[in-house]
Image (spheres, rainbow, N blue to C red):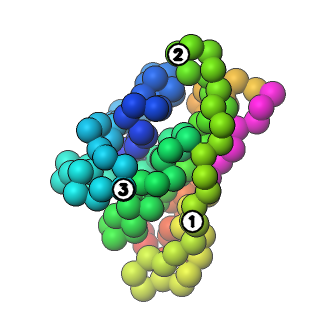
Amino acid sequence: MKTQFLYHPENDAYIASEIIEAIKFHQSHSLQGMRIGDINALGDDLFEAIKNCDVLILLIGTTFEKIAPIVWMNALQHQRPIVGIDIHTIPDEWGETRKKGGAFNTDGTFVGGKKAEIFKIYDLPKEQDGISYIKNNIEMWCEKAIEHVRSNYGIT
């Protein structure tokens, strides 16, 4: 399974690197140099990476909600399954956790499909180590996302 991780380059780079290292998936991509809200700043490399992955994994911190719709709309165009993970409870390099970011609508429609929840955002239990929880569940979440797209949108 070819995965693509997306996360905010300044706010979430440390946590993302910890997650990626722990689960040892093969591909990751940072939204490096991206100006929030500017679709042109995301760049063709990012959109090409989304197009060529099997599952898009959004690591959602405190500010990602402003750019996530741009990213997941591109994933919709290429009919890519999406897994959202709210990472605000994972401590950063200074041991601090952050306030939960804003919410965004995860409903939409793939071309030719019915309106449905496009993807699920997983919250991490406060009583467990977030990175271990992700490591133990990420494959199941990816499989569920793939099955969700197949069953709701007839994509094989």
SS assignment at label 1: loop
Residue matched to label 3: 37
Residue closest to the far right: 127
**133 left or right, relative to 27:** right
Labels 1 and 2: the sequence-earlier one: 2
Q: Position of residue 141 (x, y in %)?
A: 59, 48
Disc number at residue 144?
none
Residue type pointed to by label 3: Gly
Residue that carries the numbered disc 2 in the rendered image: 93
Q: Residues within 10 Å of mark 2 (few under 14, many from 20)?
A: few
Of circles 1 and 2, which is in front? 2
Residue 76 in the magenta stretch? The answer is no
Q: Nearer the viewer, residue 117 or 149?
A: 117
Point 69% across, 44% down: residue: 123
Is there CB contact under 8 Å for labels 3 and 1?
no
Tell me if residue 129 can be seen: yes
Magenta span covers which residues?
121-127
Q: Nearer the viewer, residue 121 or 101?
A: 101
Mark earlier in primary sequence (3, 1): 3
Please provide percent x and percent y for residue 106: 57, 65
Please tell me whether residue 122 belongs to the stretch shown in magenta: yes
Which sits in the foreground, 119 or 148? 119
Do the CB atoms of the residues marked 2 and 3 lie less than 8 Å apart? no
**Which residue matches tag 1?**
106
What type of secondary structure mainly makes up the magenta span? loop
